[in-house]
Structures are given as structure tokens and as C-alpha cells.
Image (cartoon, rainbow, N blue to C red):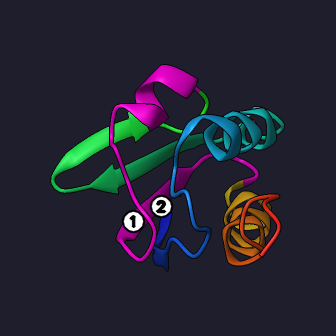
Amino acid sequence: MLQDKIRIVNESGLHARPATLLTQKAANYKSEILIIYNDKEANAKSILSVMSLGVSCGKEITLKVEGEDEERALKELKEFFASGMGEEE
């Protein structure tokens, strides 16, 4: 199991559009991917689960990844978060 802390940099946080893009990206991996925020866990492959966290810009989450492709998943998801999750600046 791998995990890392990630700061949300896109302006709208983990709301509808970026959460949709995140769940689509997370679905490409076989590993279990969890987002932890304020002591709540969300399945990164479920849009409702991700949006229920209510994470806004500037907040820090923990990304926990476990499975056969965990290294690639964590690396690529960290890059996705750092890029602003598909939103323009």
C-alpha cells in the first residue's frame, strides 16, 4: 500500500467536473484507490463518493493506493492533481 498527501490546486476543488475526470482516470487502474479527507474515506472510482467529501481548493487530502499497479496509479494521479485536474487556470 502506498499513500501520499496532495494539496488540491484547482479553483473549484473536487466538485462535479474535476471529480468526474478523477473517477474516470482512477477507473483505469486495478488498484483500490481511496481519498481521505477530514477522517472520511471515499472510493476514488465513485463520483458520488468523491463529491461527498466536499474538498475545496487549497485543502490537503491523503491518496491511498493498494494493488498490483499501485506505483503507476499513485504517480499518475499525483500528476493529475498537480495539473489542476483538467481545469484551466
Pinpoint residue 42: horizontal percent, then vertical percent: 39, 37
Q: Amino acid at mark 1?
A: Thr
**Callout 1 touching callout 2 (CB < 8 Å):** yes
Say what secondary structure mark 1 lies in.
strand
Say what secondary structure mark 2 lies in.
strand
Q: Quadrant of residue 24?
A: top right
Pinpoint residue 47: horizontal percent, then vertical percent: 56, 26
Pinpoint residue 53: horizontal percent, then vertical percent: 33, 41
Q: Quadrant of residue 58?
A: bottom left
Q: Nearer the viewer, residue 78 or 16?
A: 16
Is 73 inside the magenta-drawn segment? no
Magenta stretch, residue numbers: 46-69
Question: Residue furthest toward the left?
Answer: 39
Q: Which residue is mark 1?
A: 62
Q: Which mark is residue 63?
A: 2
**Which corner quadrant holds the C terminus?**
bottom right
Q: Residue at x 61, y 30 (%)?
A: 45
Q: Residue at x 79, y 43 (%)?
A: 25
Q: Amino acid at mark 2?
A: Leu
Q: Is residue 82 above or below residue 48?
A: below
Pinpoint residue 11: horizontal percent, then vertical percent: 58, 67
